[in-house]
Amino acid sequence: MNGQNTESDKERENICDNGYIVPNDRVNIVVGAFGSGKTEVSVNWSIALSAHGHAVRLADLDMANPYFRTREAQQLLRSKGVTPVIPSGEVQFSDLPVLIPQIKGMLQHVSDKDICIFDVGGDEPGAKVLASLRSAIGDTVYSLYQVINGRRPFTNTLQGCIEMKENIERVSGLHVTNYIINTHLMDLTTDSIVREGLILGENLSLETNIPVAFAAVMEDTVDVVKLRKTSRYPIAVMKRVMLPPWLNVNAAQSWPLAVAERKGR
Amino acid sequence: MAKILMKGNEAIGEAAIKAGCLHFFGYPITPQNELPEYLSKRLPQVGGRYIQTESEVATSNMIFGAAGVGVRVMTSSSSPGISLMSEGLSYLAGADLPVVIVNMMRAGPGLAGILPAQSDYAHATRGTAHGDFHLLVLAPSSVQEAVDLTMLSFELAEKYRMPVMLLGDGMIGQMMEPVSFPETEVGPPMQADDWALTGCRGREPRLVSSLFLDPVELNAKNHERFARYAVVAQNETRYETFNCDEPYDILITAFGVMSRVCKSAIVALKEQGVHVGMFRPITVQPFPSAALSEAIGKARRVLDVEMNMGQMLVDVQLAAKGRVEVDFLGKCGGLTPSIEDVVEAVYDSLTKAEGGG
């Protein structure tokens, strides 16, 4: 893409099982407002692409916010065949601007078979890291995806989304090439909230002449089959990865019993 | 108003505006930065003032000044930053000034870590600073509750003329949950006509100060203040109980987000036929001792769970009055006891209650 790539329309038809597009470009940068869902989208997208047979590297470029970052999903990513690119050691728990050398390598020497996704921090402060990577990006063809949740403050209007886009473009020196629609209200998400997000995305796309890549929805929150029948955009289904400790019940059903047995009760 | 998805930090900022707070002074620190960040965008839109201070020491004096002239004001920080404000907090209490202070706790002591912890319970409820005073301290466990308690904080601060602290942790600040707000765009201004420094033309000059050199006057002042604290304790203690309507063997005590892990554990245990209740103080100062004491009276043993080394534990032990033992489960440094940790600790407490420990 990047405004110059038109031979790829066919490739854009290329959709993974659970609705994710296979990107045209090898360098895919995910930006957006704080809390727009960049990490959930990046992690789920990476896993979908890996399951689709691609070699995927996911770089955590979030330096603005120390919580709910890609690095918290690194075990899951590895188990799904995705290579997480994150700082190692105790510095990964910090809010320091640590940019590891592998990042530049990913931007400059990307093999044709490799898909790289860069999960960037929120708002303009988060996007600033891209300015420091501009020389590394050079004339590499990239796609820059702006994730939009229309139920978040500051991006709940068309004007707000455009301002966010312009601010991110201004500090990063890059241009948004696609939108990813991710309007939701967590477990209170309804079909109509998702539809409201699709309309916002459509208006934004018309207003700015930038295409929507896909819309992401969390599994079990909406009727995906119904949504896909009416949506003009691919609907990608996500599993919630960033869980607070009270929802982390992967094995909860068997826990009390297992503990009871261990305790000889 | 339609529900919107917000981080706790942002939601507290918006709640302050809805409560009519148009003045914020603060210095950046993780994990509460989204709060000043949000207000730096929002306050100018509603005619308010946002100032990034040069330090937390300056912050605490600036909120003193703002409150002293009868302006509704808030600041926020995280553990080490709150420590820096300590002297100012004592001055605020000594001058009976209504301000709201948000502490999004991180792991301590020292510079320590930026992940969530409940490491400042003792600091907030007992050892805030020098001198005889209390803060009124509210501890939310969800983003919506953080909104509701922020608005309540201003109300109570002004009603009782005392600094109120909203005690959250990095988790409350950083996580996103759907929230709703009252329709009002900006709440009405603070009513402080009878004490604030509003210009003395046509009336006697006033003084807002914590300096009382006359020992008789200072003694009287402190007694008056503690009489007010007694009224606060009488009228404003708040708590939540969970699964306490049926008989229970173990009573869990927890505050803030820790209580949500405990609730998940209690639900899981219930399926195994283990009966556990939970008591969650919402005001941690004043502490709901009488209600907790009553709840403890129905338990065979108590399990206190915190994201620290056992700070609320002292208050729980006092409420137990030696009738039953109080066990403790704690993790710190940015770690949170998991559902499984709590389940396991409940089984340990049960074993001890049956004389096996």
Image: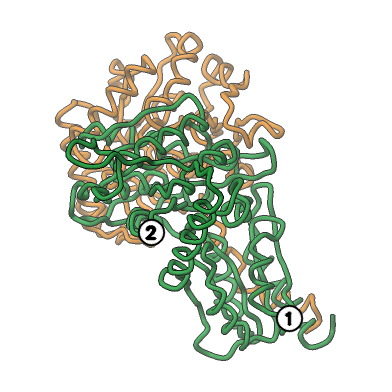
Mark 1 residue type:
Gly
Rendered location of residue B319, percent (x, y): 63, 76
Along the line of sight, which residue is nearer the eye, A213 or B42? B42
Secondary structure under tag 1 reads loop
Say how many tags the image has: 2
The quadrant of the image that shows the C terminus of chain A is bottom right
Q: Colour of chain B?
A: green
Q: Residues within 10 Å of mark 2 (few under 14, many from 20)?
A: some
Mark 2 residue type:
Tyr
Secondary structure under tag 2 reads helix
The subunit letter for the residue under badge 1 reads B
Q: Which residue is mark 2?
A: B160
Q: Toward which corner of the image does residue A190 lie, by quadrant?
A: bottom left
Q: Toward which corner of the image does residue B354 lie, by quadrant?
A: bottom right
Q: Residues within 10 Å of mark 1 (few under 14, many from 20)?
A: few
Q: Colour of chain A?
A: orange
Q: How is the image coloured?
A: by chain
Q: Nearer the viewer, mark 2 or mark 1?
A: 2
Along the line of sight, which residue is nearer the eye, B348 or B82? B82
Rendered location of residue B309, percent (x, y): 72, 57
The reply to whether residue A194 is visible in this rendering is yes
Q: Residue at x 68, y 77 (%)?
A: B302
Same chain shared by disc 2 and disc 1 = yes
Alpha carbons under labels 2 and 1: distance apart: 33 Å
Rendered location of residue B104, percent (x, y): 51, 46
Along the line of sight, which residue is nearer the eye, A252 or A107? A252
**Which callout, 2 or 1, points at the residue further toward the start of the chain?**
2
Q: Which residue is mark 1?
A: B322
The reply to whether residue A234 is visible in this rendering is no
Q: Is the residue B286 above or below the residue B8 in the image?
A: below
